[in-house]
Amino acid sequence: MSTTVSGKSGTWRNWGGNVTARPVREVAPASVEELSAAVRKAADDGLQVKAVGTGHSFTAAAATDGVLIRPQLLTGIRKIDREAGTVTVEAGTPLKRLNVALAREGLSLTNMGDIMEQTVSGATSTGTHGTGRDSASIAAQIKELELVTADGSVLTCSEKENPEVFAAARIGIGALGIVTAITFSVEPIFLLTAREEPMTFDKVTADFDELFAENEHFEFYWFPHTGNCNTKRNNRSAGPEKPVGQLSGWIEDEFLSNGVFQVANLLGRAVPATIPTIAKISSRALSARTYTDIPYKVFTSPRRVRFVEMEYAVPREALVETLRELKAMVDRSPLRVSFPVEVRTAPADDITLSTASGRETAYIAVHMFRGTPYQAYFTAAERIFTAHEGRPHWGKVHTRDAEYFSEVYPRFGEFTALRDRLDPDRRFGNDYLRRVLGS
């Protein structure tokens, strides 16, 4: 039985607090059939319809003043096929629940992002990714998906069935239909050894190619106003398991990374002049450590300090130059940036509008503490990223439009043509999609 619910005062808000929407109605379907019916009813009423996940996008990708679909009843694992090495899950399943359930079954995704609050369909539709030399984004691990299209029909897409839809819908930004189930490729659970250690900005950038080539998963954070970075290398391990100790884990992950960091950001927001000093202290607060655990416990970490984020994908060979330009810009500007800049990588993939589509990629993410003005910093950073043919993350702040995307995505026209075919009346449209895909 589906429920039609209205939020407090009918307003939907995203996690970052920078996007709000007032839908006419909210629907929480309990089955694919109920979801199809809700889409057909929206069409009868002349309303647009959007599904939301947990609101972890900083863009208005899911915002609507029409019908808002809440996926909380479409959760759980449909089936595990050990022989094929796949798991099929309902679209509203949070990644956290998927990761824990898979671990219980002795299985794991090959790679994942650094948080797991999002729903599987929200994370994949916007191109959420971790870091990897050989293993790509979460969407690149999809083997099949089920999609409710504008006329309410249900399409199954894979490399064999509706392959042109499959190529695009794995990262569909909600433009092609509403994803109802996803089949992921999984493997027997394995151990990762994480090695975290401080390193200077100059050393990381000078040795980047080597650090990238020698590690399965390499990432680092640079603290603006300092020459300091924190690096993290994750590699498969034969064991034994050596998880982070409870006390030291609490000190590093909760107290320093969330508690003290929150206080430091509140201070920085109140007195921006203190930020460079805080940055120097923060960048030295986390000491080197090594631990070995199952994948989701190594890849992901809690993020309780709220922020707003912009992230761009640049060709991997352009990373060091782009980063040096970003640092030079911050150093000579009056900007005060209290959040570290995060750098990750991904191999090229074959998804039409993936940020790594057809090219080896490096990601640079800039953040600002929630409630501090971020426009000046993001505008200056975006100018640098776009000069290197950067592609912005679909779920993070950016100012690009369809004209820009048609230049940086060779297959952009393929996606828009498919959208014209699947959703000619723009049942799944909204202002954000009009901007990034054209009308």
Image: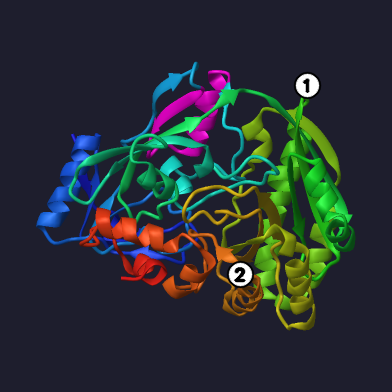
* Image coordinates for residue 334, horizontal then vertical, percent: 73, 83
Q: Secondary structure at mark 2?
A: loop
Marks 1 & 2, CB-CB < 8 Å contact: no
* Image coordinates for residue 105, horizontal then vertical, percent: 53, 18
Q: Within 10 angstroms of label 2, few (less than 14), some, or many (20 or more) residues? A: some
Q: Which residue position holds label 1?
A: 239
* Image coordinates for residue 309, horizontal then vertical, percent: 58, 63
- Distance from Cα at disc 1 to Cα at disc 2: 41 Å
Q: Label 1 amino acid? A: Gly
Q: Is residue 96 above or below residue 48?
A: above
Q: Which residue position holds label 2?
A: 389
Q: Which residues are magenta?
A: 85-106
Q: Is residue 292 left or right of residue 89?
A: right
Q: Label 2 amino acid? A: Glu
Q: Residue at x 54, y 41 (%)?
A: 116
Q: Quadrant of the C terminus?
A: bottom left
Q: Between residues 106 and 307, which one lies in front from this camera angle?
A: 106
Q: Within 10 angstroms of label 1, few (less than 14), some, or many (20 or more) residues? A: few
Q: Secondary structure at mark 1?
A: loop
Tell whether position 216 is magenta. Answer: no
User: What's the mark number on residue 276?
Assistant: none
Tell whether position 102 is magenta. Answer: yes
Q: Is residue 143 left or right of residue 390?
A: left
Residue 281 seen from this side: yes
